[in-house]
């Protein structure tokens, strides 16, 4: 007899249908898994055998063959344990074969028959809902699966509970959805003394989703400013939360099956490799740029990152997708991020300060800053200098405006963008491009004249020119205006200053 148990394989956050075919036939006793399984899938037979023994079941002394179809697709991960066990139970006549085929099953079996958490439950549940099937998963991940909609979810703590449910002696109730806890108070911008121009740039970046680069000496507050950006950003919209949670589910980062509600803020160390930033590895997992999707990727000490890692960010920053190409796979992860970077002007950090600069100044500044390529630098919308804080600034009382006041203006600007782009499939000004950029971000005559003259003098690239238009659109939104005037263009141009020392 041949039984079938549907499951899935992952290609990024996309799900590919897999048919687990289990045949129990006459012959010498054997348990074989075919269909291009990896090491974890090949070891499933030992976990299934031990789990059956724990339940008092013994495998029939026959030839058991498990085929994972299609056979030419590599099968990775321990989530194949459960569908193999269910298919085997159906082939042995323990469970009804027709009912098993109505569910997509994922789960790792323990030696005692328990079901352990696996990655990718949320995208699997969405795929099951689209296919009109139910989902069988470990109990710990039931709250994650029910976010997929009206899909029937059987979240079992162990294999025995699942058997009892199908036999009618136990009922597995539908899990309740859970949200990530949001009890952390955002850091307040009032904690930062001085740096008014940097705070303004941070507000503009938050309002339009723009990339931001801060340049300044050590201790000037660059990291503090970046850490306070999440407090200015609006919460995730439902569709955004689902997108982000799917990526974190595939990466195995969803805690207790709770849907994310805060925008991601990822700050990898500067020793991060190319696969760590962009994605890759043996199983092509998402990197930091994808884990920061719809959120912020903060790169502190930007020139200290590997040159290859920084160059690998160029394509995702432009397209909003991270493509991981390998000999046996080509995986694409969403990567629509807001890049915030910080750097010192030189290796010692005190370029321009005659009393503290090293003896190699200004040559050291040029060498240090040219670690960042021109194309990557050109993809950053806002460049702002963060000077050293004077003792007089430190003695000042807290600023009149804090995170709450600035976040209110950001929310109002974002609301204008959401209404404007509702039918265009984009969410903020940073994503505006092509014909719609010229139509919706075109300045008045005075602003156009200033932009044309400045573009020639500053030798702006076409990309830089368009990024000035996007920033000017955001400045107009912060002012509550539909028209972009000369002042908006002038302020946007002030954020396109070249890095000191770059020619």
Image: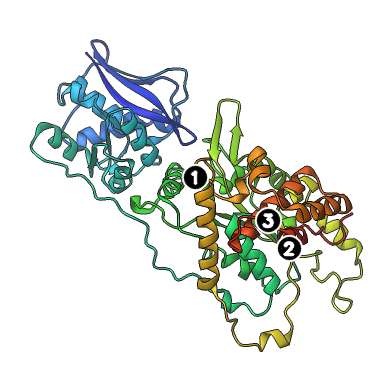
Give the residue number, with chain letter if any, for mark 2.
487
Question: For the view shown, which residue lies furthest in the front direction?
Answer: 445
Residue at image location 58% in from the left, 81% down from the top? 400
Left or right relative to 463: residue 156 = left
Q: CA distance from mark 2 to mark 1?
A: 27 Å
Q: Which of the two labelled residues, at mark 2 and mark 1, occupies the earlier sequence position? A: 1
Question: For the view shown, which residue lies furthest in the left direction?
Answer: 169
Residue at image location 65% in from the left, 47% down from the top? 273
The residue lying toward the viewer, choosing from 422 and 230, is: 422
**How many discs mark residues in the rendered view?**
3
Q: Residues within 10 Å of mark 1 (few under 14, many from 20)?
A: few
Give the residue number, with chain letter if any, for mark 3.
484
Residue at image location 37% in from the left, 61% down from the top? 181
Percent across and percent down for residue 481 are 61, 59
Give the residue number, with chain letter if any, for mark 1.
422
User: What kind of element bears circle 3?
Assistant: loop
User: What kind of element bears circle 1?
Assistant: loop
Left or right relative to 78: residue 345 = right
Q: CA distance from mark 3 to mark 1?
A: 20 Å
Task: Tell me how the rendering is colored.
Answer: rainbow
- Does the CB distance between marks 2 and 1 fall below 8 Å? no
Q: Which of the two labelled residues, at mark 3 and mark 1, occupies the earlier sequence position? A: 1
Percent across and percent down for residue 328 are 56, 25
């Amino acid at each position: 007899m041949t039984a079938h148990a549907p499951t899935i394989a992952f290609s990024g956050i996309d799900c590919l249908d897999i048919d687990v075919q289990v045949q129990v036939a006459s012959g010498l006793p054997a348990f074989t898994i075919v269909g291009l399984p990896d090491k974890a899938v090949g070891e499933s037979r030992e976990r299934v055998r031990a789990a059956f023994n724990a339940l008092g079941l013994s495998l029939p002394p026959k030839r058991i063959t498990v085929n994972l179809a299609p056979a030419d697709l590599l099968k990775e991960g321990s989530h194949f344990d459960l569908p193999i066990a269910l298919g085997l139970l159906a082939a042995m006549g323990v469970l009804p074969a027709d009912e098993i085929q109505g569910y997509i099953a994922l789960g790792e079996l323990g030696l005692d028959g328990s079901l352990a958490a696996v990655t990718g439950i949320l995208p699997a549940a969405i795929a099951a809902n689209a296919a009109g099937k139910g989902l069988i998963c470990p109990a710990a991940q039931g709250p994650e699966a029910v976010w997929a909609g009206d899909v029937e979810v059987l979240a079992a703590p162990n294999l025995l509970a699942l058997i009892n449910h199908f036999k009618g002696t136990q009922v597995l109730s539908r899990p309740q959805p859970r949200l990530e806890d949001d009890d952390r108070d955002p850091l307040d911008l009032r904690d930062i003394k001085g740096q008014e121009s940097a705070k303004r740039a941070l507000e503009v970046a938050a309002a339009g989703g723009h990339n931001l680069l801060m340049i300044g000496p050590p201790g000037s507050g660059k990291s503090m400013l970046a850490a306070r950006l999440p407090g200015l950003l609006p919460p995730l919209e439902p569709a955004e939360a689902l997108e982000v949670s799917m990526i974190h589910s595939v990466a195995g980062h969803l805690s207790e099956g709770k849907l994310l509600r805060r925008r991601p803020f990822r700050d990898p160390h500067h020793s991060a490799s190319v696969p760590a930033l962009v994605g890759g590895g043996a199983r092509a997992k998402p990197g930091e740029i994808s884990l920061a999707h719809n959120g912020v990727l903060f790169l502190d000490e930007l020139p200290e990152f590997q040159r290859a890692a920084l160059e690998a960010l160029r394509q995702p920053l432009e397209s909003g997708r991270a493509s991981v190409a390998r000999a046996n796979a080509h995986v694409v992860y969403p990567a629509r991020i807001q890049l915030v970077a910080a750097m010192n002007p030189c290796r010692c950090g005190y370029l321009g300060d005659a009393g503290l600069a090293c003896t190699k100044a200004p040559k050291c500044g040029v060498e240090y800053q040219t670690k960042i390529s021109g194309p990557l630098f050109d993809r950053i919308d806002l460049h702002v200098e963060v000077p050293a804080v004077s003792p007089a600034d430190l003695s000042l009382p807290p600023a009149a405006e804090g995170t709450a006041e600035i976040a209110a203006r950001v929310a109002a600007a974002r609301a204008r963008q959401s209404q404007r782009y509702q039918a265009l499939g984009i969410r903020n000004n940073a994503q505006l491009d092509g014909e719609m950029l010229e139509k919706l971000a075109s300045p008045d005559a005075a602003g156009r004249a200033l932009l044309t003259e400045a573009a020639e003098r500053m030798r702006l690239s076409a990309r830089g020119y368009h990024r000035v238009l996007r920033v000017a659109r955001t400045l107009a939104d912060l002012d509550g205006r539909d028209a972009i005037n000369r002042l908006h263009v002038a302020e946007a141009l002030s954020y396109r200053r070249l890095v000191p020392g770059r020619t």
